[in-house]
Amino acid sequence: MATYKTPGVYIEDVPQIVLSIAEVETAIPAFIGYTHISNKTGSTINPVRIISMLEYESIFGTADLVDITVTVTDKIDNGLVINRNVTSAVAVPSHTMYYHMQMYFANGGGPCYIVSIGQESDTVNTDDFYAGLAAVALEDEPTLLLFPDGVQLLTQDELYELYDAALQQCTDLKDRFVIMDCHGGTADDEDVPESQHRINIVSDFRNGIGMQNLKYGAAYYPFLKTSLNYRYTDDTVKIKHIYFDNFGQAGDFTAYPISNIPDYLLSNVLIDKNNIYKIGKQAANDFRITLNPSATIAGVYAATDNSRGVWKAPANVSLSSVNGLEYQVSEEEQSGLNVDANAGKSVNAIRAFPGKGIVVWGARTLAGNNGEWRYVPVRRFFNMVEENIKKAVESFVFEANDAGTWVKIKSLVNNYLTTLWKAGALKGTDESQAFYVAAGLGETMTAEDILEGRLFVEIGMAAVRPAEFIVVRFSHTMAEN
């Protein structure tokens, strides 16, 4: 209290505003992988925060140009082309970070961190990924971890061990969540039936992921057929012309880039270069990129958090820049993905529905058998609340451990949780059903706790859960006389 010694009028401001808790961003992904241009200097990895695709390109570049070979096979009769077949092949790049970033921003992504572990021209080393994971652990803001091109660059065992390390980081820091892909999302073994290949992908994933910290991660399947084109130029698209004439002879025209098609004859027919150029250009444009879904899903998380809140399940959401799926997951197949009878490791399906497009059709964590942490929005909501309250009560460290401090903390947390309840994040018709906050001697602490400088605050919340199974029951109503 101020001491007044001189007669006069004194003005004092009496604080009336209740302390409040500022919310942290809930969907800030950290993309860990190789980039076209790297800011890595020696062994030092510096996570960089960006907010747009333009900013990504200015710092990390784009992607290598791909080589596309287009083969035009013509059947010529009396100088006229009576049948034409066009096939094309592309040298698929193993580094795809640039394309994943395009999908992230196309699906609602915003601020994020790029953790460049080296240049795309570098030799792939699993230690680089772990170094990137360690670097992002020092950043407070990221809330999502993902390794977009891990499925292309790492073996199954390497990727799943990396996921386990990421899950451990989430458990240690308690402020982040891992979005995972199932390795081998594209079938390249012709000897394995497609149906069996699908089963193997999920089975291998479940066997590869350990049993620890499952509530901090979620997996998605299958791969996405995007509307994105590979980066190419007219110089990297080459066209090869083969013909069959009336004599059954095949002519083989040397592959030329479409930027420099010479005049040439096929079966004594002068070929229109402009027409061949258009064919090559169209074939190159028809190539679409197939990607694993993690970065796209990160964009969905960000968009859902911004529009509805972190407590809303990031599901039943249409995906942008997606034309199809690598596999069409059926109702029966999804039952096996959603519920894992052995270990509870749920895998969220992405499905195509008539009139709705390609949608995310699952919202489970890997802890599918855990009643508390089965759903993605529940785990991420608690992450947000825990982080917000932790930061807010840090201001009370070294304050007197007495009733005055306890009341302030309880009031602070109560006001924050009331705001969340009113926003629809908590269940209950009144606040007492939605949450409780306890702090005090004989309530959460003993006299010994106070002597030892320990202040315990206990918070309980009834988080809303997604209506995963909606059952509408019908019955006959009998006519009454």
Image: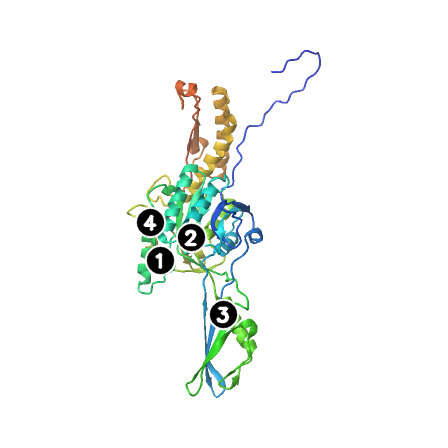
Q: CA distance from mark 2 to mark 3?
A: 29 Å
Q: Can the viewer see residue 249?
A: yes
As drawn, the residue found furthest toward the front would be: 42
- For residue 330, the mark is 1
**SS under mark 1:** loop
**Residue farthest toward the right in the current orientation of the protein:** 8
Mark sitting on residue 401: none
Marks 4 and 2, the one that precedes in the sequence: 2
Q: Which residue is found at the position 49% from the left and 70% from the top?
A: 283
Q: Is residue 118 left or right of residue 162?
A: right
Q: Secondary structure at mark 2?
A: helix
Reading the chain from its start, which is encountered first: label 1 or label 2? Answer: 2
Q: Residue at x 43, y 43 (%)?
A: 177
The disc labelled 2 sits on which kind of residue? Answer: Gly
**Regarding mark 4 in the picture, which secondary structure is present there?**
helix
Mark 1 vs mark 3, CA separation in Å: 31 Å
The location of residue 325, given as percent across then percent down, is 42, 59
Rounded to the nearest angstrom, the CA distance separating label 1 from label 2 is: 27 Å
Q: Secondary structure at mark 3?
A: helix
Ranked by sequence position, the earlier of labels 1 and 3 is: 3
Mark 4 Cα within 10 Å, few/some/many (few <14, many 20+)?
Answer: some
Circles 2 and 3, Cβ within 8 Å, touching? The answer is no
Q: Which residue in the structure is indicated by mark 3?
A: 283
Residue tagged 2:
150
Instruction: Name the kind of residue labelled 3 in the image.
Output: Ala
Q: Which residue is mark 4?
A: 208
Instruction: Pick the residue in front: 329 or 84.
Output: 84
Quadrant the N terminus occupies: top right
Q: Earlier in the sequence, mark 2 or mark 3?
A: 2
